[in-house]
Amino acid sequence: MRVAVIAVGRLKQGPERELADRYFARFDEVGRKLGFRELTVHEISESRARDAATRMAEEAAAIAAHIPDKSILVALDERGQNLDSTVFARHLGRWRDEGAGHTIFVIGGADGLSPELRRKAKLAIAFGSATWPHQMVRIMILEQLYRAATILAGHPYHRA
């Protein structure tokens, strides 16, 4: 199964990029042994439209262009479910075992994800009720992907 993170906005060089790159590499190393063939991150430019609805629609169209047919779509959204890491790992492992070709995690822009993308999502995940900067959400989903891979591999990284 291929895994992708599609995020509106770019991570600049610095500590956030370094941390994201670290979890990306860790997942890639562990994940390949578990049948996760590829992890990619697609950065989408933020819309410059004047109103929020148009910005969300433009960003949704750019996101949709990177989603292959029959993908499992997971929205990272403040209205989503709060999953513990073990449950998250079970979802990822089940989708892999069911033969899903792609699992795509989407992070919207400052206005959030369009209602259409949220409706298409098989799962919506929140990282608590706080509002997080999009750069931090990207780091957190990459860490959770790595953690999920270690849980599925029986690696001692996760000690809950």
Image (spheres, rainbow, N blue to C red):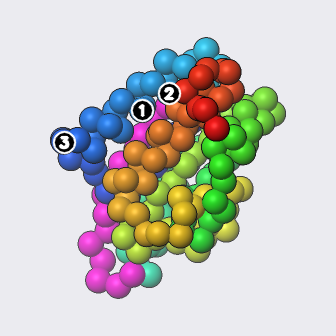
Q: Mark on residue 38?
A: none
Residue 108 rendering spot, x and y as whole percentages: 45, 63
Q: Is residue 52 left or right of residue 151?
A: left
| Local crowd size for mark 1, using a 10 Å CA cut-off: few (<14), some (14–19), many (≥20) | many
Whether residue 46 appears in magenta in the rendering, the answer is yes
Q: Residues within 10 Å of mark 3 (few under 14, many from 20)?
A: few
The residue type indicated by label 3 comes to Gly
User: Would you identify the image quadrant in which residue 1 lies?
Assistant: top right
Instruction: Identify the residue under disc 3.
Output: 14
Check disc 1 and report the residue beneath it.
Answer: 23
Residue at x 43%, y 54% (from the top left corner): 137
Question: Depth check: 157 or 62 in front?
Answer: 157
Q: Is residue 28 above or below residue 110?
A: above
Task: Label 2: state its secondary structure.
Answer: helix
Residue position marked by numbered label 2 in the rendering: 27
Quarter location, residue 36? top right
Q: Magenta stretch: give its range.
A: 39-52
Q: Are marks 1 and 2 in contact (CB under 8 Å)?
A: yes
- Residue 71 at what x, y percent from top left? 66, 45
